[in-house]
Image (tube, rainbow, N blue to C red):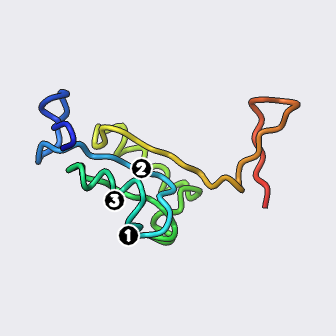
Amino acid sequence: MCCTCAQVGGHAMDGRWHILILFAGPPERKDGLAAFLRKLGCAVTEIDVRIGGAEHDVLDPVVQQRLLARVQGGEFHAIFAAPPCNCLLYTSDAADDMQCVD
């Protein structure tokens, strides 16, 4: 079982950890992180355009603000972010410079 919020000082209404997964991948994947966390008893919110379409488009400033407000409000106990590997490219000339490659 996943640790309960009471054990770690969280405040979820039902006592379970609430996990946010950004770029979650295909919906209802049986071998994915969300499925594993749910089996452990965690509440999971998956964000991905393949799941929620435009409502999950994190490039949209309105969506960004809505997610940020939820995070800042303490809704989530942990956040996993797994941006698509083919989108971000680290250049060897400037380690902190990222470019999107299509």
Distance Cα–Cα, label 2 vs label 3: 21 Å
Count of all numbered marks drawn on residues in the image: 3
Locate residue 38, reporting x and y percent: 26, 55
Quadrant hosting residue 15: top left
The three-letter amino acid code for the residue at tag 2 is Leu
Do tag 2 and tag 3 residues touch (Cβ < 8 Å)?
Answer: no
Task: State the residue at coordinates (19%, 33%).
Answer: 10
Q: Of the residues under marks 2 and 1, which one precedes in the sequence?
A: 1
Task: State the residue at coordinates (47%, 63%).
Answer: 56
Do tag 2 and tag 1 residues touch (Cβ < 8 Å)?
Answer: no
Question: Considering depth in this image, is 66 or 101 the residue closer to the camera?
Answer: 101
Closer to the camera: disc 2 or disc 3? 3
Q: Which residue is mark 3?
A: 35
- As helix, strand or loop, the secondary structure at mark 1 comes to loop
Quadrant hosting residue 84: bottom right
Task: State the residue at coordinates (25%, 55%).
Answer: 39
User: Height in image: 95 above or below 2?
Assistant: above
Quadrant hosting residue 45: bottom left
Do tag 1 and tag 3 residues touch (Cβ < 8 Å)?
Answer: no
Question: Which mark, residue 28?
Answer: 1
The three-letter amino acid code for the residue at tag 1 is Glu
Question: Which mark, residue 17?
Answer: none
Residue at the front extreme, as displayed: 31
Distance Cα–Cα, label 2 vs label 1: 21 Å
Q: Of the residues under marks 1 and 3, which one precedes in the sequence?
A: 1
The quadrant in which the N terminus is found is top left
The three-letter amino acid code for the residue at tag 3 is Ala
Residue at the right extreme, as displayed: 93
Locate residue 4, reporting x and y percent: 16, 38
Closer to the camera: disc 2 or disc 1? 1
Q: Which residue is mark 2?
A: 67
- As helix, strand or loop, the secondary structure at mark 2 comes to helix
